[in-house]
Image: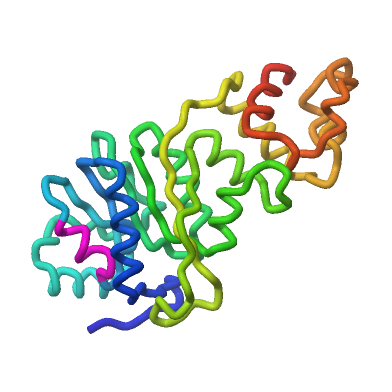
């Protein structure tokens, strides 16, 4: 068997109905290559291995879990990358899909890795801490709307699919969970990516202030007189931020 390691944030899904529901969500968008992140004890893996005519890989940091997976499903030989998802290069040389019950302690970093891979990423279906999933899916005007909301939504459509009860895991986590799906969207019309990222991060760094005060160093005084700058960062849509980049110094 195997042991559960708190240091790696391991909470393994044990509810078969939820596992099948996650796999069904990823199969709604066709793919030829699939990366599973953190297969653990194989709750999703055993269903994914039944998908025909795809190239499958999994990335797992825990050597003990890798041995368990290979002993249980010998067909995985040569398909498991022993590393953290944060340390690997793109797993395929062509477009691919990602699925996973992601370690909650690195969930934000995983989302930014999806951003780095966006040119090849076709779909991502993942389980996150509910609070993180809600932030990613939040729209402008919501108090939890922030940097990660804007940056992810600039490149992906975000679907908040369903929530998962704590008792569906072993051991039950102390936080609630939710599954989201990312699919690519047309890039908003920003001036350039560097300006867009800088603007969003600067605006939310002082989110209680008006834009005029929060992002003053990035704009000329004449532009800052516009009443638009009376707004706060959380009131701006992704496209609003994109349009603002054209006025930056």
Query: x and y percent of residue 15 in the render?
Result: 34, 75
Instruction: Report the front residue among 148 and 228.
Output: 228
Name the quadrant of the N terminus.
bottom left
Determine the residue positioned at 63% across, 28% down. 239
The residue segment tinted magenta is 42-50
Query: x and y percent of residue 57 in the render?
Result: 22, 52
Specify how the rendered protein is coloured. Answer: rainbow
In the picture, measured across the screen, residue 144 lies left or right of residue 182, that is: right
Asked if residue 45 lies in the magenta stretch, the reply is: yes
Query: x and y percent of residue 82 in the render?
Result: 26, 60
In the picture, measured across the screen, residue 20 lies left or right of residue 11, that is: left
Determine the residue positioned at 69% across, 32% down. 199
Asked if residue 230 lies in the magenta stretch, the reply is: no
Instruction: Report the front residue among 239 and 2.
Output: 239
Instruction: Report the front residue among 231 and 8.
Output: 231
Query: x and y percent of residue 117 in the render?
Result: 39, 38
Name the quadrant of the C terminus.
top right
Determine the residue positioned at 46% across, 40% down. 115
**The furthest residue to the left:** 74
Q: How many marks?
A: 0
Determine the residue positioned at 57% across, 39% down. 151
Height in image: 99 above or below 158?
A: below
In the picture, measured across the screen, residue 130 lies left or right of residue 54, that is: right
Height in image: 69 above or below 226?
A: below
């Amino acid at each position: 068997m195997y042991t559960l390691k708190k240091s790696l944030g391991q909470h393994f899904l044990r509810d078969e109905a939820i596992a099948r529901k996650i796999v069904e969500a990823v199969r709604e968008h066709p793919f030829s290559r699939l990366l599973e992140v953190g297969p653990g004890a194989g709750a999703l893996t055993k269903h994914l291995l039944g998908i025909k005519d795809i190239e499958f890989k999994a990335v797992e940091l825990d050597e003990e879990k890798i041995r368990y997976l290979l002993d249980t499903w010998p067909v995985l030989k040569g398909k498991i990358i022993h590393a953290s998802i944060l340390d690997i290069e793109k797993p395929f040389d062509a477009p691919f899909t990602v699925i996973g019950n992601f370690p909650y302690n690195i969930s934000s970093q995983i989302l930014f890795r999806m951003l780095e891979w966006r040119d090849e990423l076709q779909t991502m279906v993942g389980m996150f801490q509910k609070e993180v999933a809600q932030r990613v899916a939040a729209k402008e005007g919501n108090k939890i709307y922030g940097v990660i909301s804007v940056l992810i939504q600039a490149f992906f459509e975000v679907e908040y699919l369903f929530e998962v009860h704590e008792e569906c895991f072993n051991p039950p986590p102390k936080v609630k969970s939710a599954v989201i799906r990312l699919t690519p969207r047309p890039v908003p019309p920003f001036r350039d990516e560097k300006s867009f990222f800088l603007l969003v991060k600067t605006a939310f760094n002082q989110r209680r202030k008006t834009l005029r005060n929060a992002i003053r160093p990035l704009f000329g005084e004449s532009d800052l007189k516009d009443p638009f700058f009376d707004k706060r960062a959380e009131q701006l849509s992704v496209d609003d931020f994109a349009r603002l980049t054209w006025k930056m110094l």
